[in-house]
Amino acid sequence: MKNSSVKDETIFDLKYFKKYGSIIGLDEAGRGPLAGPVFAAAVYVENENELKALKRIGADSKTLSEKEREKRYNEIIKNFKYSYYAASSELIDEMNIFKATQYAMKKCVEQLNSGYCLIDGKNFHFSFPFECIVKGDSKLSLIGAASIIAKVLRDKYMIKLSEKYPEYLFYKHKGYPTKEHVEKIKKYGIFNEYRLTFNPVKSMIINNEIQYNKNDFSKNTLMKLGVL
């Protein structure tokens, strides 16, 4: 249950594979938005050939164009064992974003065979063997591959949400707090995909500045905000 933060060094997936055998890379997408779930994804490799093949594909999702990300996503899900889990906005409000992300990662690992887990980020805690690696998505192709899956799946989710609620333009901002998005919130209000504990949504609710149906949201969260 190692929880180290490795910084400022070149890290090779092969080093971990030779030390631990089967390994799992974990990453998330969507911790910062005002709306939509946070997605976690995991990619599993159990032999050196798989690892080498993944190194030719994997890259940090943030460095790729949408088209290139989609292409690599298709290659990864076709050739490797993977899993994902989406923690809802309600769960995020109930647990907080860090704990909800950690929970989603745990659910990903439960879907795969056992392996030593390499996780992008820091301060996570799990009962299974793991290591946190700061900026791991840019250092390890295995984590980079997980970042691609998480990002693509979350984007697909938000694009689908945009079809249901076209006035919010989710296909553009993916739920992040852009100026345009905040203006849409002020105009149209919020619904159950929104995170009530995230500002500026939180402050607008407390100050009664936006429309929303209390039945769409958790009573516990509404009570926590003092509006129920």
Image (spheres, rainbow, N blue to C red):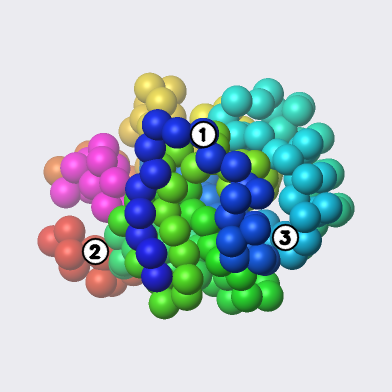
Percent x, y for residue 224?
A: 17, 64
Kind of residue sitting beneath label 1? Thr
Judge from the rendering whether residue 16 lies leftward or rightward of residue 57; answer left or right. Answer: left
The front one of 96 and 105 is 105
Rounded to the nearest angstrom, the CA distance separating label 2 from label 1 is: 46 Å
Q: Secondary structure at mark 1?
A: loop
**Mark 2 sits on what residue?**
222
Which label is found at residue 118?
none
Under tag 3, what secondary structure?
A: strand
Q: Which of labels 2 and 3 is toward the front?
A: 3
Identify the magenta region: 193-206
The residue singled out by tag 1 in the image is 10
Q: Which residue type does callout 2 highlight?
A: Leu
Q: Residue at x 65, y 58 (%)?
A: 18
- The quadrant holding residue 222 is bottom left
User: Residue 81, how many percent across, how many down?
Assistant: 76, 62
Earlier-in-chain disc, 2 versus 1: 1
Q: Is residue 36 above or below residue 200?
A: below
Please tell me which residue is depicted at 68% across the width and 23% down the height of the picture: 65
Q: Judge left or right: residue 11 versus residue 33.
A: right
Frontmost residue, 163 versus 142:
142
| Crowd class of label 3 (few under 14; some 14 to 19; many from 20; radius 10 Å) | many
